[in-house]
Amino acid sequence: MSSAIVPASNKTITLAGNGETPATDSKFSIFSPVVTVEHREFYERIVSELNGVFPICTQGKCTAVEVSEDATEQEQITDLMKRVESFSGELLEVTKQLFDQFYQAKEHFCKMIHGTTAYVKINLMDRNLLERTCDVRWWALETAFSDVIEFRERVSERLRAILDGPHNKPDGDVLREVIEEKERWEVNAAANERLQKSLAMFDDTETLIADVRAVLKKASFACDRLEDINSSYTLYRDLVIACRDGMIIANSNKTTRPRVLGLNVAGENWFQKALTTKDGTQYHAQDLTESSIETERSLIYSAGIREQSDNYGKVIGAMGVFFDFQGEAMMILEDHMSRDADNFVEDGWYSFITNSEGVVIASSDPGVIEPGKSAHLPRKQRTPPAGLRPMTYSVIEGQESAVFSARTDGYLDYPGLGWASHLVVPKDQIFRTAASNTQLGISIDELMQSRLVPDINKQTFTKVQDDKESIQLISLNGIVFASKLGKRGVALGPIFDQIKQTGEFTTSKMEYLLTEMAVGELQLNLQALENFSKQAIDLIDRNLFERAADVRWWSTDQYFWTALKDPTPENFQKAAHRMEVINGSYTMYRNLVLANRNGEVVASARSEDRHKLKAVSVYDDQWFLMAMRTNKSSEYAVQDVMTSKLEPRKERSLIYSGGVRVGGARAGDPIGVVGILFDWDTEGKKILATCLPKDRDGRLIGGCAAFYTNSHHEVIETTDPEHFPVGKLLSLPMAHNQLKAGQSTSGLLVINGQRYIMGSSRTKGYREYAGLGWLAHVLRPV
Amino acid sequence: MHIVTFAAAGGIHGIPILAVEEFTRPVPVTPVPLADRRVAGLMNLRGKSGTVIDLRKCFVKPHGEPSPNGKMILLETTDRLTEEARQLSVQVFREPVVLLVDRICDIFPIRFQDVQPRPAHVPERFVTGVLKHGKDYVSLIDLMILIDDILNPRGTS
């Protein structure tokens, strides 16, 4: 039996030493174009100084022979010279390693920061799209929609019966013409009128005529409801209801309505897929495609409309919602880009999204990276495999650039559409030397010793100082030795002086480089924390936007206004049941309550708390008072995180509320209020946990914390209840406190005697949701 | 005369360069039982052995913290002094002695007229004078007084 002999030489020497980049092809070369001019000069000076030591040592050895005939003395001098040579040789090696580490560390860190940014962008998109899938399923079960479709079908059947029945009226042909002509009587008032007139020729058609008229009314009501939805959720360009035969009977977009109503979408994929859904929990997400409904390419979510609006009813039609993908994508793409003083995106920075085929579907600069075309990237990066975040260097618009990519991994139960986000950063910006004139607020020594500087750099730092010391000791001993030779030693003096100077020069340059590295590392760390805090505030803003949308829409629900208008126990029961259904479909709420105009809770979602809440008056509560003051259904109110008597056992509640109006009217004084209790602790914590910094191996870094503070600097949710508990008042540096909406900053600070670096971002809201003035903070101990 | 300066106990001190045999990084020291508290122990470097005196402990009120990577100064012995050193009346101990200091600073020539007497507030008898070098005050140490006091206590020699 023979076993393979592992050759001893298969151990590759990694200069970078961070253990993950293969050393073979990433060995440092001073000729690499990424090396800055300063550094190349720096490197050349160090190398030439060190190389200069060798002739000096040779000269020293010769001088030894000249000044002394004593063999022991000669040997001592020669020995010193040899030691100097060996240390100089080592320093040459260390210098190379140092530059290698310097550039690899920078590249790695940038990869991490920009790779994360690319990922955050696609993740934001996915989270948004997930919410859309909930929306469409929920709305498709609205009674107004099943009602119009079912009613229209019944009327159509009766019309067909007349046509097919025995009749000899000459008007039968007119009738057929009206029913089958392109201008649909269901949605077109003139056509409807004509149909009514021709029906009048027949006997016993009075009720049918009324019903024909009623279809138009019901379709118009469906349009109203769609408009209501869209004024609550502003992310859609259009929402449409299609009958089983594919005819669009209602839409939300008034501008396109004359063209869209009556269109037939029977041949469109989103419609066909919606018809095949098995029950109310299913939906179809249609990747960007052409649709007759819109002129732009559309991203469509669709679900089946079911008989009686029952979750398990037969499919009788489809709802399609046309997400404002281009608008949303623009918002996401323009974020996290380096900007100049005038707030323009800096040259050479691009951000774009590709679909599963690697075709650009949205671009921050359509003039350069053109939507509709295949992205100019290596194949593996154009459609990157899930979970990987590849990076390549490429020339974009004549500029050497780094392209960072991240593919969607979906979000929760939403698998995503196989899209990828790409971020283009000019290459020279990655290797740009850290500005050294910035106020750091930390001494270099402290920084070098801190946890921010990777061990490998610390080791090099120690090694450089060690070598510096060795050379210093050797030259000092040389001088001592020379001085003892008296006059004979005079010739040796300058040689040791020269060695000492060279040693000091090179090592101090290297120390400088190391501190530059440490400063760079610090700055990149600060930037990473800033990005994380921005991510934390963006995610919560987007989440809360959805809550503000939900409450506006639910406030128009007929069960609620019916119960308030006609307060019978039965109606309250129905309202409560409706709330229970809503609460069952949305996991992010703890409870929903309906209060009448006197502030009495008359219905709530959680049956176990219902009798307790009946005794509660919310008349003095902010969420109630503010919602009672609204006078449009497009308005809502929110009560910032605080205690609430609706949940006495919870420390803090976050309540969104909207005014309920009779008939779900769009304007007018409310007759009561719907309040929704957001599951703040859980959702806030969940988001914060995703915004904690990780090390190079993807592990969480110990001692880091992320938390939100409200406008009074009070911690309202935290990942670190020990050091930053909820309720703690923080005194933050001015730069953090005075952030304006949408701004971010970072810096060093001491809290509880521990020094941290911290990134903070102030909410800028999202779309028409203004935010509550909160800040997100992410901290890392130094 | 050239002196070598070094940092210890929070101050800068100087001794004649001709009294020095070699500078080294610290080598392991074997503690000596019942020795003077200023004696760190015995060391051995390439066959040379010597008594290590922790200079910091020789000061009444040392400042700051001792350096984690101090240096050793191996002193000459009386018999190995060069002719020049004898002429300049450099004095060293008869046996090998090593000084443990924080850091070696510099080597430079001094003129005797620049040396001022020990200020009244300095209690250490082994400091025989001070002089200004750059921005530092260098206290000159008389090695015989220092070592005698530790290794030759009065009455036993």
Image (cartoon, coloured by chain):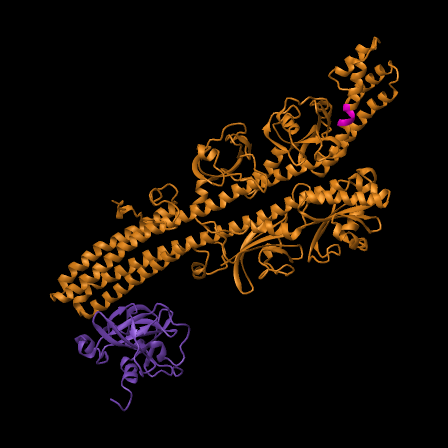
Chain colours: A orange, B purple
Quarter of the figure with residue A510: bottom left
A213 lies left or right of A106:
right
| Observer-nearest of A41 and A367 | A367
In the figure, A742 relative to A483: above or below? Answer: above
Residue A223 seen in the current view: no
The quadrant the N terminus of chain A occupies is: top left
In the rendered image, the vertical position of residue A655 relative to residue A316, given as above or below: below
Name of the residue lying farthest toward the bottom: B155
Q: Is residue B116 left or right of residue A484?
A: right
Q: Nearer the viewer, residue A79 or A281?
A: A281
Q: Is residue B155 left or right of residue A297?
A: left
Q: Position of residue A101 (x, y in %)?
A: 38, 50
Where is residue A175 drawn, in percent x and y?
A: 80, 13
Residue A511: image location, x then y, percent: 37, 57
Magenta extent? A149-153
Question: Relative to A724, is A29 on the left or the right?
Answer: left
Main SS type for the magenta part? helix
What residue do we see at 18% from left, 61% from top? Answer: A78
When the figure is inspected, residue A219 is found, relative to residue A44, above or below; the finding is above
Question: A575 and A565: which one is in front?
Answer: A575
Q: Quadrant of residue B111?
A: bottom left
* Residue A728 pos. (x, y %): 63, 61
In the picture as drawn, the residue positioned furthest to the front comes out as A1
The one nearer the camera, A64 or B148, is B148
Residue A308 in view: yes
